[in-house]
C-alpha cells in the first residue's frame, strides 16, 4: 500500500525488540493507530523527538489494511509545548488528556473534530494560568464524552426530566444531574452542592460556545475535587471500564500535599 501523510498526536510508546518501538498516536485522518518505528529507540535516530508523548508531529507511514501495526517511514515535529515539558504539573494535565484518549477511543475511528480538540486542549494546558488547568481538563472530558456519543445531562434531572427542582447529586450510571426527589430513591447518586451543579452547567455551556473562560477559580478545593470525581466516574461508567489514569492519580497526590500544607500553615514557597 502507498505511504500516506498525516498530522499525529503521540499518546504513548512501548518497546519492540532491541532498537524499535511501537508508537500509539491519534491521527487527524485515520483515528488512533499503532505505528512501528524501526530503530526508533536509538539515540539521535532519524525520528528524533518527534515520537515523544504529547508531541504534535507530521508523520509518513504505510497503513496496514484490516488493522494491526502500520510501518512508520518518517516523522517531523510540528508542536512540542515547551512550557508543558518544563512544568511537572502542566505535564501531568497534558498527560491526563492523552491517557483518556488512549483508554477510551477505539482504533481506526477517524474524527477530525476530536483531533482538533486534543490539539487545542494541549495548547490550553501550555498557556493557561495554573488555577485554570482544572477547567481545561473538565472541558476536554465533556468534549471527549460528546465525541464518543454520551454527553451527560446537565440541564435537567436525568431521571424525571424536572428542570426546576433543587439539584441534589450526580449519577454516573444514569448519566447526569438528579433532583432531590430522585436522589432519595436511587443508590447511585454522589451528593453534591448547588454550587457544584451550577459549575458543571457553566462548563457545559462553555463547551457548547467554545469559550475558554475559567469557572472554577472561586471554588473550594473540595468542590473542585467533586467535579473532577463526577466527570471521571461518568467516563468510567459510560465507557464501560475502570479508568486508572496515572497522571490524574499524580495530580490527586499533589492536591493532598497542598491541602496538608494549607491546613498546617506551612509555607511551601
Image: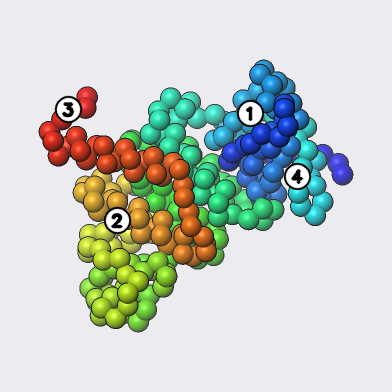
* Residue on which disc 2 sits: 226
Q: Is residue 18 left or right of residue 136?
A: right
Image coords of residue 251 (percent x, y): 36, 41
Image depth: mark 2 or mark 1 in front: 2
Image coords of residue 143 (percent x, y): 48, 55
| Disc 4: CA contacts within 10 A as few (<14), some (14-19) or many (>=20) | some
Q: Is residue 134 left or right of residue 26?
A: left
* Residue on which disc 4 sits: 69
- Find the distance from the CA under tag 2 to the CA under tag 1: 37 Å
Residue 189 sits above or below residue 1 on the image: below
Q: Is residue 215 left or right of residue 243?
A: left
> Which of marks 1 and 3 precedes in the sequence?
1
Q: Which mark is residue 39?
A: none
Residue 254 sits above or below residue 236 on the image: above
As drawn, the residue found furthest toward the front would be 18
Residue 148 visible from this viewpoint: yes
Q: Secondary structure at mark 1?
A: loop
| Disc 2: CA contacts within 10 A as few (<14), some (14-19) or many (>=20) | some
* Residue on which disc 3 sits: 267
Amino acid at each position: 500500500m502507498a505511504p500516506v501523510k498525516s498530522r499525529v498526536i503521540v499518546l504513548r510508546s512501548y518497546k519492540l525488540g532491541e532498537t524499535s518501538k511501537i508508537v500509539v498516536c491519534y491521527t487527524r485522518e485515520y483515528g488512533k493507530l499503532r505505528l512501528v518505528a524501526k530503530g526508533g529507540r536509538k539515540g539521535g535516530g532519524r525520528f528524533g523527538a518527534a515520537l515523544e508523548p504529547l508531541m504534535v508531529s507530521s508523520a509518513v507511514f504505510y497503513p496496514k489494511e484490516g488493522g494491526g501495526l502500520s510501518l512508520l517511514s518518517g516523522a517531523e515535529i510540528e508542536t512540542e509545548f515547551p512550557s508543558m515539558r518544563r512544568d511537572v504539573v502542566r505535564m501531568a494535565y497534558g498527560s491526563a488528556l492523552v491517557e483518556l484518549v488512549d483508554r477510551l477511543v477505539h482504533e481506526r475511528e477517524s474524527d477530525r473534530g476530536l483531533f482538533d480538540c486534543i490539539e487545542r486542549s494541549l495548547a490550553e494546558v501550555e498557556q493557561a494560568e495554573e488555577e485554570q488547568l482544572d477547567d481545561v481538563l473538565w472541558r476536554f472530558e465533556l468534549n471527549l464524552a460528546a465525541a464518543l456519543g454520551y454527553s451527560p445531562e446537565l440541564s435537567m434531572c436525568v431521571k424525571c426530566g424536572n428542570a426546576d427542582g433543587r439539584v441534589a447529586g450526580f449519577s454516573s450510571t444514569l448519566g447526569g444531574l438528579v433532583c432531590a426527589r430522585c436522589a432519595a430513591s436511587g443508590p447511585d447518586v454522589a451528593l453534591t452542592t448547588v454550587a457544584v451543579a451550577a459549575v458543571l452547567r457553566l462548563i457545559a455551556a462553555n463547551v457548547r460556545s467554545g469559550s475558554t473562560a475559567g469557572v472554577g477559580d472561586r471554588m473550594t478545593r473540595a468542590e473542585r475535587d467533586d467535579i473532577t470525581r463526577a466527570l471521571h466516574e461518568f467516563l468510567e461508567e459510560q465507557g464501560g471500564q475502570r479508568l486508572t489514569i496515572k497522571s490524574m492519580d499524580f495530580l490527586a497526590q499533589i492536591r493532598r500535599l497542598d491541602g496538608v500544607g494549607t491546613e498546617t500553615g506551612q509555607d511551601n514557597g
